[in-house]
Amino acid sequence: MKIVCTACGKAHKTNAKLETSLKSLQPGSSLRMKCLQCGEQIVLGRELLGKAASSSGQQTAQPFVAKRIKPPEPPDTSWLEDGIFEEDEIVSDIPQSMVLMPEGPGREQVVKALTGLGYRAETAMDTNHALERMQFFNYSSIVLHSGFTGDRLADNEFHRFMCAMNMARRRYIFYVLIGSEFKTFYNIQALAESANLVVNEKDTPYFGVILRKSIPDYEELFGPYMEELKVQRK
């Protein structure tokens, strides 16, 4: 027999002592026990014994086997070469961005795109340099290449730092991951890596177009929420 807290849904197992106490209850009387999870009081009556007997007489249900869910396909990015989309907003008032990418044409393209959109873009020499900068500056955007340190992304010290960051600060940073393993605009990959956007490295020539599409969408979705948090001083 299980007792379920109506406040939080926590299921509690009963014991012989509790069942004996329930059987000895007078009609209309009840027992109270404290939920181990939320601390709310759970009211117990003799009717619980009747429910337990009824459920024990039913046929044992077959175990539930979860079906494999196929994730949606990544979005079509064929329009990137033309750079045509409905642009409703202009990115502005975003002061600083930090780029953590190996030196090369890809990094130059990303920095150029960020600068063209009004960012004050800077590059990090290594992970320690980037972490040190994070102590003194509030960046509105951070771009990290998955191969920046040569390690797997899961082992990247800066990426772990971003994933563990307090949400009071993290929610104001537009975090972009670039790498050959990513599919541009694929939000499921971004969510799995605690990022706001993922970009395949072959699409870095279109990075400016990608940001002009992504940042307004991000601000439209989260802007009102973050403004309310500012009002509430959270």
Image: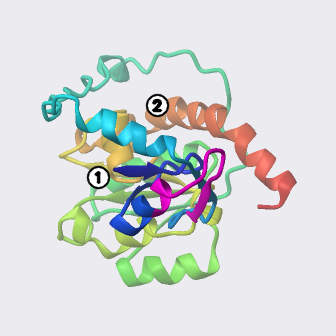
Asked if residue 212 is positioned above or below residue 77 in the image, the reply reads: below
Which residue is most to the right?
231
Relative to 184, is 114 on the left or the right? right
Residue 104 figure quarter? bottom left
x 36%, y 23%: residue: 80
Q: Which residue is mark 2?
A: 209
Query: In the image, which residues are magenta?
Result: 21-34
For label 1, the residue is 105
Rendered view: 76 above or below 32: above
Residue 1 sits inside the magenta stretch: no
Q: Quadrant of residue 86?
A: top right
Residue 161 in picture, x, y percent from top left: 42, 73
Q: Count how many numbered circles sit on residues in the image.
A: 2
Q: Residue at x 63, y 55 (%)?
A: 172
User: Is residue 227 left or right of 25 when viewed as pictured?
Assistant: right
- Residue 105: image x %, image y %? 29, 52
Image point (54%, 76%), residue name: 134
Q: Amino acid at mark 1?
A: Pro
Which colour scheme appears in the figure? rainbow
Q: Horizontal and vertical percent for residue 57? A: 22, 33
Which element carries disc 2, helix, strand or loop? helix
Choose mark 2 or mark 1, whichever is in front.
2
The magenta stretch spans residue 32:
yes
